[in-house]
Each structure stands twice: as C-alpha cells, then as structure tokens.
Image: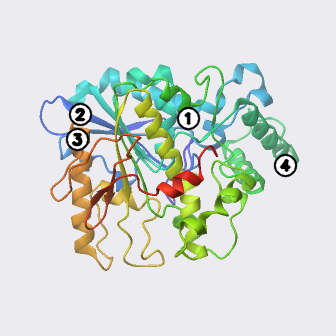
Amino acid sequence: MQAGAPGLAHSEDCLYLNVSAPQGEGPFPVLVWIHGGGFLSGHSFDPLTDGAVMAKQGVVCVTVAYRLGVFGFLDMEPLLGEQYRGSANNGLRDLMAALEWVQENIAAFGGDPSHVTIGGESAGAKLIGILMGIPAAQPLFHQMISQSGGAERIWSQSHGAEVALGFEKNWLKRGKADLLSAPATELIRAQGDFIAKWPEHFPLRSAIDGILLSKLPIATIANGSTRGKRLLIGTMRDESAFFIGPHPQRPVSAGDLGNLPLESFGKVFNHYHAVYPEANDELLRIRSLTAEEYWLPSMRAVQAHEKGGGKSWLYRLDFSESSGPLRGYAYHSMDVRLVWNKPSLTVENAAEEAAMSQQIHQAWLGFLHGKVPASPGLPTWPEFHSDTRPTMILDSKSRVELSPQEQELRLWDGVL
C-alpha cells in the first residue's frame, strides 16, 4: 500500500510505474527513480520528479511505486508463520519486479535495457544501497545515483522479528486479532500508533532474511556485488535541520537516530565540540545527526563500492536555502528540486538558485548518459578513491576538496 498526495486516498492498488520517453527511436539511457518517504509514505507521481524533465534531455524516465509501511517492511513470519518469511523485504521485491519489467519492456519505449540507472533520494537512496547488496538484483541495473542514502537501513533477522512482535502486541491491544482479514486502513492506523510508541527511529525497515538478503548489504558490496558499476553518491551538508529544526533546543533522543542506540551516539557526540570549537550546540546537533543518518552511511557505501571494484563520484551539497525558517541550511530533500531543475522562484536568491540547479541537473544528466558528471562552471570531478576521498562541494562556487571532514570521520571509526 502507498500513501498518496494530500487529499488522495490510500489504495492497495499501488504496484504501478510511470514511463516518460523522449521523442525518437533511441536507444536512450534509462533512469528508474525510487521515491523517498521513510519507507512509510511518498508516491511515484510527485510533480517535483516529473519524468518529462528527463525525457526532454534524452533519458527514458521510469518512476516506480512499492509497498510501504507494514505492507512492505514488516516481518510477518513471527506473526503468521514460516510461509511469510522474508516479508520485511516485500518493498524490495516490488522494486525488483519493476526493474524486471524495465528489462523486458523498456525497449518498446526507446530505452536501452543495458543502460539502466537506479536513482533515488532519502529512503529511495537507502533502498538503492540495499539493492546494491542483493546478488539477485545485479542484472537489473548498471549505475546508481544515491542522494542522502547509504546501505545501513536494515535490521538483523532477530531484530526484525522483535519489531514484528512489538507491532503484534500493539495490535492485540486494539482488540484486532486477525491480521489477514483486517482492513488496510485499520492496519495503517495501528502502524501509526506503533511507530509513535516504538523507541527506535523508523522501526519498519528491510531485514536479513536468508532468502533475498543473507548478510548486510555493505558486506556484499565490499565483496564485489557491484563490481564494474558506476555510482554517483552524496549528501546535504545540514541534512538533519529538516527534521529537528534550525534551532534545536532539546538534546538528541533515541527517536532522532537512524542507525545507532543513543548511548553509542552520545560517546561520539561528546567529542564534536573539540572538532568544531566555533560551532554552537544547535549546529553540533544538526551536523552529528547528519553524520549518523546520512553522511557516514554514504561514506561507508562509497568505500565498499570502491573496494568491491566499482567506480564512484562523491559530492556534498552546500548550497543553502536563502529564505524561510531554514535559511542558511543545506537541508534534507532540498537537492531534489535542484537535480530535477525545478528551482524555487520565490527564494531571495532565485537567479543564483536557478544557475545552481541548471549546473547540478547537467552534471546528473552527464552521469546518466554514461559520462563523468560534469557541467559548465564545475571543476573537473575526480573519481573517488578512499585514500584521498576527493569530494565535489556543490555550491555557488563549487570546488573539489580532498579528505573533507577528516577529524569528524575519525570520531566515527568503528562505531557503525
């Protein structure tokens, strides 16, 4: 089941995709875009990611839907029996089914099935990181674009079962015993109640199941699952300002963390002021949570991909908002409008944002067409290597930095 846009009803008729194709015969490169939404919400028909934008630039664009929440990412085996083993990965199976459809049918739309890029932002990018670690998925795509992702959003099999039992306990308290016959709307209401009470952030997520996933994706990637493939990956400088606000007064809680228990995070956070002595406590909270949820997982993914024999280009997007409460922050999801060349016309620096958007859009298009990401005004973008970590800093005056945030990275050694 997917959650629609505001004002639209939920529906279990949700496994569909949208194709936007250029004029002409092709063959054209293909982008399969996976939407974000925390594994709980989002839809494949967001006007911000309209496939026609890419089609006008010679790319067949496919936006896909997948099951969300308890329908796509809850392990039902502990609740309903062995035949439901692996159900925490139903959303992943939906994406693989869509990619299989692309392989079989995209040529009819002028697309090249041998040149398929999977791209996504936030939860979409995290799902891409997991797909990179699924051996059975590898014939279905050839390049990856990960915007604010990583490959860490996954439970062990035992923890996935613990989450399922927690959901069941909450479900039974509602006096509803039959999961199979319950209306979908009732399951969604129970899902919201469960998430509000569960002590961990995003409890509904994929899990090791011994079927689709036999080990953590990051280990499979490092062992060569994506050997020979190309990866464009990066994060926003201030991702977490979007979630905790530009002036977070309260301490970090367990509910703010995507990958670590609060105690482990606290041991790292205690050293952040030594690394950034000029930063106030508010900014330290934003930067440390950004690292835990997005920057560090993305760094681990790009390093694993390199170790496994793949090529990568790494970025950090520093271009910041110029209006509103998040003014001055390069926050989570702001990159989507820039990548899809839909800059805001209402911000104070509208002309500057339009130029930045065009530059980023062109660089992404170059990657989609099989080239090194490049755009007029950008310096030469070097391939990633772990020893120097060359990173394209995307800003009004973009630049390449070697080993950025080195001291911060050292704080996290061995933590995940």
Residue lying at 20% horizontally and 55% vertically, measured from the top left: 379
- Tell which circle, 2 or 3, labels the residue nearer the N-terminal end: 2
Exactly how many numbered labels are in the figure? 4
Camera-side residue: 77 or 144? 144
Left or right: 81 as drawn, with respect to 342: right
**Tag in front: 3 or 1:** 3
Q: Which residue is mark 4?
A: 174
Quadrant holding the N terminus: top right
Q: Which residue is mark 1?
A: 91
**Label 4 to label 1, Cα distance in Å?**
26 Å
**Tag in front: 1 or 2:** 2
283 up-or-down from 185: above or below = below
**Label 3 to label 1, Cα distance in Å?**
31 Å
Q: Amino acid at mark 3?
A: Val
Q: Which residue is mark 3?
A: 372
Q: Secondary structure at mark 4?
A: loop
**Tag in front: 4 or 3:** 3
